[in-house]
Amino acid sequence: MLVAIVGRPNVGKSTLFNRLTGRKRAIVDDQPGVTRDRVYGEVDWGGRTIPIVDTGGYVPHSAERFETAIREQVDIALSDADVVLFVTDVTTGITDIDQEMAQRFRRSDTPVLLVANKADNDERRWAANEMYGLGFDEIYPVSASNGIGTGELLDALLEALPENDVDTPDERTGIAVIGRPNVGKSSFINALLGFDRSIVTEVSGTTRDAVHSQVEYEGRELTLIDTAGLRKKAKVKENIEFYSALRSERAVREADVCILMVDATVGLENQDVRVFREAEKHKKGMVLAVNKWDLVEKDTNTAKRYEEYFHRILDRQSHVPIVFTSAVTRKRVYKVLDTALQVADERAKRIQTSTLNDMVQAAVEAHHPPTYRGNYVKIKYATQVRSDPPVFAFFCNHPDGIKESYRRYLEGKLREAFGFDGVPLTLAFKQK
Protein backbone atom coordinates (compact mmCIF):
# COMPACT_ATOMS: atom_id res chain seq x y z
CA MET A 1 0.00 0.00 0.00
CA LEU A 2 1.35 3.42 -0.92
CA VAL A 3 0.06 6.98 -1.30
CA ALA A 4 1.85 9.43 -3.63
CA ILE A 5 1.66 13.22 -3.39
CA VAL A 6 1.84 14.58 -6.94
CA GLY A 7 1.50 18.05 -8.49
CA ARG A 8 3.36 20.70 -10.39
CA PRO A 9 6.26 22.45 -8.64
CA ASN A 10 5.66 24.99 -5.86
CA VAL A 11 2.08 24.00 -4.95
CA GLY A 12 3.09 22.89 -1.44
CA LYS A 13 3.55 19.14 -1.80
CA SER A 14 6.44 18.96 0.66
CA THR A 15 4.61 21.15 3.18
CA LEU A 16 1.60 18.82 2.92
CA PHE A 17 3.89 15.80 3.38
CA ASN A 18 5.38 17.37 6.51
CA ARG A 19 1.90 18.17 7.86
CA LEU A 20 0.52 14.67 7.28
CA THR A 21 3.55 12.82 8.64
CA GLY A 22 4.04 15.20 11.55
CA ARG A 23 7.70 15.80 10.86
CA LYS A 24 9.89 18.12 8.84
CA ARG A 25 11.78 15.72 6.62
CA ALA A 26 11.22 17.40 3.27
CA ILE A 27 13.05 20.66 2.60
CA VAL A 28 10.55 23.47 2.04
CA ASP A 29 11.35 26.67 0.17
CA ASP A 30 9.52 29.15 -2.02
CA GLN A 31 11.75 28.28 -4.95
CA PRO A 32 10.21 25.62 -7.22
CA GLY A 33 12.03 22.32 -7.59
CA VAL A 34 13.68 22.31 -4.16
CA THR A 35 12.82 18.68 -3.41
CA ARG A 36 15.48 16.68 -5.22
CA ASP A 37 15.65 13.48 -3.17
CA ARG A 38 12.20 11.99 -2.78
CA VAL A 39 11.07 11.53 0.79
CA TYR A 40 9.16 8.67 2.37
CA GLY A 41 7.14 8.69 5.55
CA GLU A 42 4.12 7.24 7.33
CA VAL A 43 0.78 8.74 8.28
CA ASP A 44 -1.06 7.42 11.34
CA TRP A 45 -4.79 8.01 11.03
CA GLY A 46 -7.90 6.12 12.02
CA GLY A 47 -5.93 3.24 13.46
CA ARG A 48 -4.01 2.64 10.24
CA THR A 49 -0.43 3.37 9.24
CA ILE A 50 -0.24 4.64 5.68
CA PRO A 51 3.07 4.77 3.75
CA ILE A 52 3.32 8.03 1.81
CA VAL A 53 5.84 9.47 -0.65
CA ASP A 54 6.54 13.12 -1.47
CA THR A 55 7.42 13.23 -5.16
CA GLY A 56 8.73 16.76 -4.85
CA GLY A 57 9.09 19.29 -7.63
CA TYR A 58 11.40 18.88 -10.58
CA VAL A 59 12.04 21.77 -12.96
CA PRO A 60 14.22 20.91 -15.97
CA HIS A 61 15.96 23.68 -17.85
CA SER A 62 14.04 23.31 -21.09
CA ALA A 63 10.30 23.52 -21.62
CA GLU A 64 10.31 20.20 -23.48
CA ARG A 65 12.02 18.37 -20.62
CA PHE A 66 9.68 20.08 -18.16
CA GLU A 67 6.64 18.61 -19.90
CA THR A 68 8.31 15.21 -20.11
CA ALA A 69 9.12 15.27 -16.40
CA ILE A 70 5.55 16.17 -15.42
CA ARG A 71 4.10 13.37 -17.56
CA GLU A 72 6.54 10.87 -16.10
CA GLN A 73 5.72 11.91 -12.54
CA VAL A 74 2.04 11.24 -13.23
CA ASP A 75 2.73 7.90 -14.92
CA ILE A 76 5.00 6.83 -12.06
CA ALA A 77 2.38 7.67 -9.45
CA LEU A 78 -0.35 5.85 -11.39
CA SER A 79 1.88 2.79 -11.83
CA ASP A 80 2.95 2.28 -8.24
CA ALA A 81 0.62 4.20 -5.89
CA ASP A 82 -2.69 2.85 -4.58
CA VAL A 83 -4.04 6.39 -4.09
CA VAL A 84 -2.76 9.71 -5.50
CA LEU A 85 -3.09 13.07 -3.78
CA PHE A 86 -3.18 15.54 -6.69
CA VAL A 87 -2.14 18.90 -5.19
CA THR A 88 -3.07 22.24 -6.75
CA ASP A 89 -2.68 25.86 -5.62
CA VAL A 90 -5.79 28.01 -5.05
CA THR A 91 -3.70 31.21 -5.20
CA THR A 92 -2.70 30.62 -8.81
CA GLY A 93 -5.82 28.80 -9.99
CA ILE A 94 -5.88 26.17 -12.72
CA THR A 95 -2.85 26.12 -14.99
CA ASP A 96 -2.25 24.31 -18.27
CA ILE A 97 -0.06 21.81 -16.43
CA ASP A 98 -2.85 21.12 -13.91
CA GLN A 99 -5.27 20.48 -16.77
CA GLU A 100 -2.93 18.06 -18.53
CA MET A 101 -2.23 16.18 -15.30
CA ALA A 102 -5.96 16.02 -14.53
CA GLN A 103 -6.69 14.51 -17.94
CA ARG A 104 -4.14 11.76 -17.38
CA PHE A 105 -5.48 11.07 -13.88
CA ARG A 106 -9.09 10.87 -15.05
CA ARG A 107 -8.19 8.20 -17.62
CA SER A 108 -6.76 5.90 -14.95
CA ASP A 109 -8.35 3.46 -12.51
CA THR A 110 -6.19 4.66 -9.61
CA PRO A 111 -8.18 6.66 -7.03
CA VAL A 112 -7.16 10.33 -7.12
CA LEU A 113 -8.06 12.92 -4.47
CA LEU A 114 -7.89 16.52 -5.71
CA VAL A 115 -6.27 18.70 -3.02
CA ALA A 116 -6.70 22.49 -3.29
CA ASN A 117 -3.81 23.73 -1.16
CA LYS A 118 -3.11 27.16 0.38
CA ALA A 119 -6.80 27.63 1.32
CA ASP A 120 -5.74 29.54 4.43
CA ASN A 121 -8.92 31.60 4.92
CA ASP A 122 -12.62 31.68 3.97
CA GLU A 123 -11.97 33.71 0.83
CA ARG A 124 -9.45 31.20 -0.46
CA ARG A 125 -11.69 28.27 0.47
CA TRP A 126 -14.41 29.81 -1.71
CA ALA A 127 -11.83 30.30 -4.47
CA ALA A 128 -11.04 26.59 -4.28
CA ASN A 129 -14.34 25.89 -6.05
CA GLU A 130 -12.57 26.87 -9.27
CA MET A 131 -10.77 23.52 -9.08
CA TYR A 132 -13.99 21.73 -9.99
CA GLY A 133 -13.03 22.83 -13.50
CA LEU A 134 -10.46 20.01 -13.49
CA GLY A 135 -13.33 17.52 -13.75
CA PHE A 136 -13.23 15.79 -10.37
CA ASP A 137 -16.41 15.11 -8.38
CA GLU A 138 -14.88 16.27 -5.09
CA ILE A 139 -12.18 18.70 -4.01
CA TYR A 140 -10.47 18.95 -0.64
CA PRO A 141 -9.47 22.53 0.30
CA VAL A 142 -6.60 22.44 2.77
CA SER A 143 -3.91 24.62 4.20
CA ALA A 144 -0.82 22.46 4.54
CA SER A 145 0.97 25.24 6.41
CA ASN A 146 -1.55 25.39 9.31
CA GLY A 147 -3.42 22.09 8.98
CA ILE A 148 -6.87 23.40 7.98
CA GLY A 149 -8.85 20.69 6.18
CA THR A 150 -6.26 17.92 6.53
CA GLY A 151 -8.51 15.86 8.80
CA GLU A 152 -11.24 15.72 6.16
CA LEU A 153 -8.61 14.84 3.56
CA LEU A 154 -7.28 11.95 5.65
CA ASP A 155 -10.79 10.63 6.27
CA ALA A 156 -11.37 10.58 2.51
CA LEU A 157 -7.99 8.93 2.01
CA LEU A 158 -8.95 6.08 4.35
CA GLU A 159 -12.12 5.50 2.35
CA ALA A 160 -10.17 5.44 -0.93
CA LEU A 161 -7.55 2.97 0.27
CA PRO A 162 -8.00 -0.80 -0.09
CA GLU A 163 -9.81 -2.23 2.92
CA ASN A 164 -7.05 -4.68 3.76
CA ASP A 165 -3.70 -2.97 4.02
CA VAL A 166 -2.00 -6.20 5.09
CA ASP A 167 -1.44 -8.83 2.44
CA THR A 168 -2.51 -12.41 3.10
CA PRO A 169 0.40 -14.11 4.86
CA ASP A 170 2.57 -16.09 2.44
CA GLU A 171 4.46 -19.08 3.80
CA ARG A 172 7.08 -18.69 1.08
CA THR A 173 10.27 -16.84 1.95
CA GLY A 174 10.12 -13.44 0.25
CA ILE A 175 13.42 -12.22 -1.22
CA ALA A 176 13.55 -8.80 -2.89
CA VAL A 177 16.33 -7.70 -5.22
CA ILE A 178 16.66 -3.96 -4.77
CA GLY A 179 19.07 -1.21 -5.73
CA ARG A 180 19.65 1.73 -8.03
CA PRO A 181 19.06 1.57 -11.79
CA ASN A 182 21.76 -0.01 -13.94
CA VAL A 183 23.48 -1.99 -11.19
CA GLY A 184 22.56 -5.29 -12.84
CA LYS A 185 19.34 -6.37 -11.10
CA SER A 186 17.77 -7.62 -14.34
CA SER A 187 20.87 -9.56 -15.33
CA PHE A 188 21.07 -11.07 -11.86
CA ILE A 189 17.43 -12.18 -11.88
CA ASN A 190 17.82 -13.61 -15.39
CA ALA A 191 20.91 -15.51 -14.29
CA LEU A 192 19.02 -16.97 -11.32
CA LEU A 193 15.96 -17.95 -13.32
CA GLY A 194 17.84 -19.07 -16.41
CA PHE A 195 18.04 -22.68 -15.26
CA ASP A 196 15.31 -25.31 -15.16
CA ARG A 197 16.11 -26.05 -11.50
CA SER A 198 14.61 -22.74 -10.40
CA ILE A 199 11.47 -21.33 -11.90
CA VAL A 200 8.01 -22.79 -11.29
CA THR A 201 5.50 -20.08 -12.15
CA GLU A 202 5.53 -16.35 -12.74
CA VAL A 203 2.66 -14.16 -11.60
CA SER A 204 1.96 -10.46 -11.28
CA GLY A 205 2.62 -9.26 -7.77
CA THR A 206 0.66 -6.86 -5.60
CA THR A 207 3.34 -4.26 -6.40
CA ARG A 208 2.26 -2.98 -9.78
CA ASP A 209 4.78 -3.53 -12.55
CA ALA A 210 7.08 -5.57 -10.31
CA VAL A 211 7.31 -9.28 -11.04
CA HIS A 212 6.92 -11.89 -8.35
CA SER A 213 8.46 -15.23 -9.37
CA GLN A 214 7.35 -18.20 -7.34
CA VAL A 215 10.46 -20.33 -7.15
CA GLU A 216 11.38 -23.74 -5.80
CA TYR A 217 15.04 -23.83 -4.89
CA GLU A 218 16.83 -26.57 -2.98
CA GLY A 219 13.49 -27.88 -1.72
CA ARG A 220 12.30 -24.48 -0.48
CA GLU A 221 9.41 -22.36 -1.73
CA LEU A 222 10.49 -18.77 -2.42
CA THR A 223 9.00 -15.62 -3.84
CA LEU A 224 11.58 -13.56 -5.75
CA ILE A 225 10.51 -9.92 -5.97
CA ASP A 226 12.17 -8.31 -8.97
CA THR A 227 12.11 -4.51 -8.90
CA ALA A 228 14.15 -4.16 -12.07
CA GLY A 229 12.84 -2.75 -15.34
CA LEU A 230 10.31 -0.06 -16.20
CA ARG A 231 7.06 -0.47 -18.09
CA LYS A 232 7.80 2.80 -19.91
CA LYS A 233 11.39 3.95 -19.87
CA ALA A 234 11.65 7.28 -18.12
CA LYS A 235 13.71 9.93 -19.89
CA VAL A 236 14.38 12.28 -16.99
CA LYS A 237 17.17 11.11 -14.68
CA GLU A 238 15.46 12.28 -11.49
CA ASN A 239 12.30 10.39 -12.42
CA ILE A 240 14.24 7.21 -13.13
CA GLU A 241 15.77 7.44 -9.65
CA PHE A 242 12.38 8.19 -8.14
CA TYR A 243 10.75 5.22 -9.84
CA SER A 244 13.55 2.92 -8.66
CA ALA A 245 13.35 4.19 -5.08
CA LEU A 246 9.56 3.95 -5.03
CA ARG A 247 9.55 0.33 -6.11
CA SER A 248 12.39 -0.57 -3.75
CA GLU A 249 10.38 0.94 -0.88
CA ARG A 250 7.41 -1.30 -1.64
CA ALA A 251 9.55 -4.39 -2.21
CA VAL A 252 11.26 -3.91 1.16
CA ARG A 253 7.89 -3.98 2.91
CA GLU A 254 6.90 -7.23 1.20
CA ALA A 255 10.15 -9.16 1.64
CA ASP A 256 11.68 -11.17 4.46
CA VAL A 257 15.20 -10.65 3.11
CA CYS A 258 16.46 -7.89 0.82
CA ILE A 259 19.40 -8.34 -1.53
CA LEU A 260 20.83 -4.86 -2.01
CA MET A 261 22.71 -4.93 -5.29
CA VAL A 262 25.45 -2.39 -5.88
CA ASP A 263 27.85 -1.77 -8.75
CA ALA A 264 31.42 -2.73 -7.82
CA THR A 265 32.76 -0.09 -10.21
CA VAL A 266 30.76 2.69 -8.55
CA GLY A 267 30.42 1.74 -4.88
CA LEU A 268 27.74 2.78 -2.40
CA GLU A 269 25.79 5.97 -3.08
CA ASN A 270 23.28 7.89 -0.97
CA GLN A 271 20.29 6.11 -2.49
CA ASP A 272 21.85 2.71 -1.65
CA VAL A 273 22.34 3.73 1.97
CA ARG A 274 18.78 5.11 2.18
CA VAL A 275 17.29 1.84 0.93
CA PHE A 276 19.52 -0.07 3.32
CA ARG A 277 18.29 2.05 6.24
CA GLU A 278 14.70 1.48 5.13
CA ALA A 279 15.21 -2.29 5.22
CA GLU A 280 16.86 -1.98 8.62
CA LYS A 281 13.97 0.13 9.93
CA HIS A 282 11.49 -2.55 8.89
CA LYS A 283 13.69 -5.24 10.47
CA LYS A 284 14.31 -7.09 7.22
CA GLY A 285 17.23 -9.41 6.64
CA MET A 286 19.95 -7.94 4.42
CA VAL A 287 22.58 -9.21 2.01
CA LEU A 288 24.91 -6.89 0.10
CA ALA A 289 25.56 -8.23 -3.40
CA VAL A 290 28.47 -6.49 -5.10
CA ASN A 291 27.82 -7.01 -8.82
CA LYS A 292 30.14 -6.54 -11.82
CA TRP A 293 33.00 -7.97 -9.80
CA ASP A 294 34.49 -9.22 -13.07
CA LEU A 295 35.18 -5.60 -14.06
CA VAL A 296 37.35 -4.85 -11.00
CA GLU A 297 41.13 -5.19 -11.15
CA LYS A 298 42.02 -7.41 -8.21
CA ASP A 299 44.91 -8.44 -6.03
CA THR A 300 44.95 -10.68 -2.96
CA ASN A 301 43.48 -7.97 -0.67
CA THR A 302 40.90 -6.39 -2.98
CA ALA A 303 37.87 -8.15 -1.49
CA LYS A 304 38.98 -7.32 2.05
CA ARG A 305 39.43 -3.63 1.18
CA TYR A 306 35.96 -3.55 -0.39
CA GLU A 307 34.41 -5.17 2.70
CA GLU A 308 36.06 -2.63 4.98
CA TYR A 309 34.83 0.19 2.74
CA PHE A 310 31.23 -1.06 2.70
CA HIS A 311 31.11 -1.66 6.45
CA ARG A 312 32.59 1.78 7.14
CA ILE A 313 29.88 3.47 5.04
CA LEU A 314 27.08 1.36 6.50
CA ASP A 315 28.22 2.23 10.05
CA ARG A 316 28.36 -0.65 12.51
CA GLN A 317 26.59 -3.07 10.17
CA SER A 318 29.49 -5.50 9.93
CA HIS A 319 27.03 -8.35 10.51
CA VAL A 320 25.62 -7.92 6.99
CA PRO A 321 27.11 -10.58 4.68
CA ILE A 322 28.77 -9.37 1.48
CA VAL A 323 28.94 -11.51 -1.66
CA PHE A 324 30.98 -10.49 -4.70
CA THR A 325 29.25 -11.65 -7.85
CA SER A 326 28.96 -11.18 -11.60
CA ALA A 327 25.54 -11.57 -13.15
CA VAL A 328 27.06 -11.57 -16.64
CA THR A 329 29.45 -14.47 -15.96
CA ARG A 330 26.99 -15.98 -13.42
CA LYS A 331 29.81 -16.29 -10.94
CA ARG A 332 28.45 -16.68 -7.39
CA VAL A 333 24.86 -15.76 -8.32
CA TYR A 334 23.61 -18.79 -6.42
CA LYS A 335 25.98 -17.96 -3.57
CA VAL A 336 23.98 -14.70 -3.23
CA LEU A 337 20.71 -16.64 -3.05
CA ASP A 338 22.14 -19.21 -0.63
CA THR A 339 23.34 -16.40 1.62
CA ALA A 340 19.90 -14.75 1.53
CA LEU A 341 18.30 -18.03 2.63
CA GLN A 342 20.82 -18.35 5.46
CA VAL A 343 19.86 -14.84 6.58
CA ALA A 344 16.16 -15.84 6.43
CA ASP A 345 16.92 -18.80 8.70
CA GLU A 346 18.83 -16.54 11.09
CA ARG A 347 15.89 -14.13 11.16
CA ALA A 348 13.55 -16.98 12.17
CA LYS A 349 15.91 -18.39 14.81
CA ARG A 350 14.80 -18.63 18.44
CA ILE A 351 17.20 -18.91 21.40
CA GLN A 352 16.30 -20.89 24.50
CA THR A 353 15.84 -18.70 27.56
CA SER A 354 18.34 -20.63 29.68
CA THR A 355 21.02 -20.44 26.97
CA LEU A 356 20.32 -16.75 26.47
CA ASN A 357 20.64 -15.98 30.17
CA ASP A 358 23.93 -17.84 30.44
CA MET A 359 25.26 -15.53 27.72
CA VAL A 360 23.79 -12.40 29.35
CA GLN A 361 25.23 -13.28 32.75
CA ALA A 362 28.70 -13.80 31.27
CA ALA A 363 28.45 -10.54 29.33
CA VAL A 364 27.40 -8.56 32.41
CA GLU A 365 30.16 -10.08 34.55
CA ALA A 366 32.73 -9.16 31.90
CA HIS A 367 31.41 -5.61 31.59
CA HIS A 368 28.88 -4.22 34.06
CA PRO A 369 26.40 -1.53 32.99
CA PRO A 370 27.32 2.01 34.11
CA THR A 371 25.64 3.30 37.25
CA TYR A 372 22.42 5.29 36.87
CA ARG A 373 21.87 8.24 39.23
CA GLY A 374 24.23 6.67 41.72
CA ASN A 375 22.54 3.25 41.57
CA TYR A 376 23.85 -0.02 40.16
CA VAL A 377 21.97 -1.20 37.08
CA LYS A 378 21.19 -4.90 37.38
CA ILE A 379 19.90 -7.02 34.50
CA LYS A 380 17.84 -9.76 36.17
CA TYR A 381 17.12 -11.94 33.15
CA ALA A 382 16.39 -11.87 29.41
CA THR A 383 14.14 -13.72 27.02
CA GLN A 384 13.46 -13.76 23.29
CA VAL A 385 9.87 -12.59 22.91
CA ARG A 386 9.56 -13.13 19.15
CA SER A 387 11.33 -14.16 15.97
CA ASP A 388 10.88 -13.13 12.34
CA PRO A 389 12.26 -10.56 13.23
CA PRO A 390 13.99 -11.37 16.55
CA VAL A 391 13.15 -9.26 19.60
CA PHE A 392 14.84 -9.67 22.99
CA ALA A 393 13.49 -8.32 26.28
CA PHE A 394 15.91 -7.55 29.10
CA PHE A 395 14.39 -7.08 32.55
CA CYS A 396 16.31 -4.80 34.88
CA ASN A 397 15.88 -2.42 37.82
CA HIS A 398 16.70 0.79 35.86
CA PRO A 399 15.85 0.44 32.14
CA ASP A 400 16.70 4.11 31.54
CA GLY A 401 20.21 3.40 32.76
CA ILE A 402 20.99 1.24 29.72
CA LYS A 403 22.66 3.66 27.34
CA GLU A 404 23.23 3.19 23.61
CA SER A 405 26.85 2.12 24.05
CA TYR A 406 25.89 -0.70 26.42
CA ARG A 407 22.99 -1.68 24.16
CA ARG A 408 25.48 -2.07 21.30
CA TYR A 409 27.75 -4.08 23.59
CA LEU A 410 24.96 -6.55 24.39
CA GLU A 411 23.96 -6.76 20.74
CA GLY A 412 27.56 -7.58 19.86
CA LYS A 413 27.60 -10.33 22.47
CA LEU A 414 24.32 -11.73 21.12
CA ARG A 415 25.77 -11.89 17.62
CA GLU A 416 29.05 -13.32 18.89
CA ALA A 417 27.20 -16.13 20.66
CA PHE A 418 24.29 -16.86 18.34
CA GLY A 419 25.05 -15.40 14.91
CA PHE A 420 22.08 -13.50 13.46
CA ASP A 421 24.18 -12.48 10.45
CA GLY A 422 22.37 -9.97 8.27
CA VAL A 423 19.48 -9.58 10.74
CA PRO A 424 18.57 -6.39 12.63
CA LEU A 425 18.02 -7.13 16.33
CA THR A 426 15.63 -5.34 18.65
CA LEU A 427 16.70 -5.09 22.30
CA ALA A 428 14.01 -3.84 24.68
CA PHE A 429 14.76 -3.03 28.32
CA LYS A 430 11.91 -3.29 30.81
CA GLN A 431 11.35 -2.65 34.49
CA LYS A 432 11.59 -5.63 36.83
Image: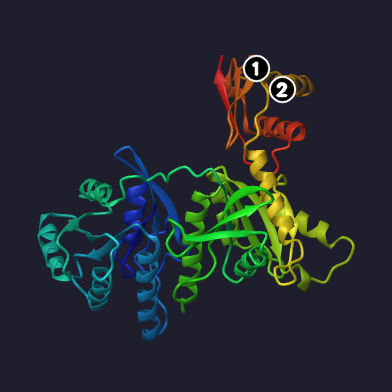
Q: Local crowd at mark 2 within 10 Å, few (<14), some, or many (≥20)? A: many
Residue 412, picture quadrant? top right
Label 2 element class? helix
* Mark 1 crowd level (few <14, some 14–19, many ≥20, 10 Å Cα): some
Q: Helix or strand or loop: what does disc 1 sit on? A: strand
Q: Earlier in the sequence, mark 1 or mark 2?
A: 2
User: Mark 1 touching mark 2, by CB under 8 A?
Assistant: yes
Query: At 68% from the left edge and 30% from the top edge, which residue is drawn?
Result: 406
Image coords of residue 428 (percent x, y): 57, 28
Q: Can see residue 431?
A: yes
Image coordinates of residue 355 in percent, x first then y, are: 73, 22
Residue that badge 1 annotates? 381
Image quarter where the C terminus lies is top right
Q: Which residue is mark 2?
A: 360
| 359 or 285, nearer to the observer | 285
Q: Residue at x 70, y 19 (%)?
A: 357
- Of the pair 401 and 383, the residue shown nearer to us: 383
- The residue type indicated by label 2 comes to Val
* Residue 74 drawn at (x, y percent): 34, 70
Would you place residue 249 above or below residue 169 in this image? Answer: below
